[in-house]
Image: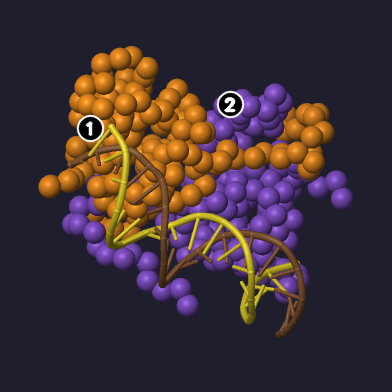
Chain colours: A purple, B orange, C brown, D yellow
Amino acid sequence: MKRGKLKSQQRSGCPVSISLEALGDRWSLLIIRDMMVRAFHTFKQFRESDEKIATNILADRLQKLMAAGIITAEPEKSDGRKVNYRLTEKGIDLAPVVLDLLIWGTRYEETGAPNAVVEKMAANRDEVLAEVRRRWQERDPVPFLPSFSNVGGQSK
Amino acid sequence: MKRGKLKSQQRSGCPVSISLEALGDRWSLLIIRDMMVRAFHTFKQFRESDEKIATNILADRLQKLMAAGIITAEPEKSDGRKVNYRLTEKGIDLAPVVLDLLIWGTRYEETGAPNAVVEKMAANRDEVLAEVRRRWQERDPVPFLPSFSNVGGQSK
DNA sequence: CCGGATCCGTTTCGATACTG
DNA sequence: CAGTATCGAAACGGATCCGG
């Protein structure tokens, strides 16, 4: 199994450790991004995402994000097979950072076509973040309405 | 206001690709963090950092960060052996994001001792960012003064 | 000494097949 | 649908060596 994190206590003073316990890999941030900006919340959605993550890796990353307290998983009541992943408070608080990272990334992108989506989100930053919070916060029903999220889109 | 028309790049392209070409690994963000918050700028400093990165990995990551246009390398004029790594404009613009990530991380840390360093930086956010820009911006001499960077540690 | 490169055993990743 | 099991491929990381 996976055991042991922390190989040692280092020295008494860990000076300024960035907390990428769970973010220091290629997929975790993408998963969080998809939850924030595309309202993804099921295994299937992540798996069919544009990045084509392998199922075992996806399962592992979701688990690690849960262990880090960034997301939670709860089985859908109406359908036992489905599992709904949600951002926790900690995860929601990560939204501004991820959004800014997104904005930063597109701002320096070479592709002649700058992401209109991100530009739009950059313009409505506060609204986007409020929407993220509204969608994921602990309340119950939360029908997962699409909003700005259906941009990249499920036209299937 | 949520969503207007915006192009139909849809799923053929990458809809909202986060730009972690170079950030999607365990080390790159740490390197950038150390440049920002501890003013590291030499191979040796990174290597002797608390995280104990292997030299081959370090060399590889520095190279990838250069390829991504986030840092540059220039040999020290006074000492041919040394190489000074610098944040580019793109790298400097990443500072707010990394700083916020730092703040986010410490805010949810379990360690009873919250990073006083980060708390301090959170309080003086603008000043810290200005300092980063001041230190790394393209001008010439830049004696690499320590400032807020030597707070956390290194009692060596 | 400094910034790397090379070798090599170990760990992790990732594509696919498979299970509940 | 949401995950495991498997297995080859790639990345990691430690040690050592090298050019300046």
Residue corresponding to mark 2: A107
Q: Quadrant of residue A130?
A: top right
Q: CA distance from mark 1 to mark 2?
A: 29 Å
> Residue at 56% of width from left, 61% of height from top?
A61
Label 1 Cα crowd, 10 Å radius (few <14 / some 14-19 / many 20+) = some
Whether C16 is drawn above or below C13: the answer is below
Q: Mark 2, chain letter? A: A
What's the residue type where badge 1 is placed? Phe
Residue that appears at 46% across and 60% down: A68
Q: Position of residue A80 (x, y in %)?
A: 72, 74
Task: In this rendered view, identify the residue nearer to me: B47 or A27.
Answer: B47
Q: Classify residue B21 as left or right of residue B111.
A: right
Q: Position of residue A45 (x, y in %)?
A: 72, 56
Task: Name the element at disc 2.
Answer: helix
> 10 Å neighbourhood of mark 2: few (<14), some, or many (≥20)?
some
On screen, residue A68 versus residue A37, left or right, reads: left
B89 up-or-down from A59: above or below: above
**Residue B131, image x and y in percent?**
30, 24
Q: Which residue is mark 1?
A: B148
- The image shows residue B105, relative to residue C16, as above or below, that is above
Give the residue at the far right of this rendering. A156
Measured as percent of width and height from the top left, residue A122 is found at 60, 28
Circles 1, 2 touching at the beta carbon (< 8 Å): no
Along the line of sight, the residue nearer the viewer: A132 or A66: A66
Residue B32 seen by the camera: yes
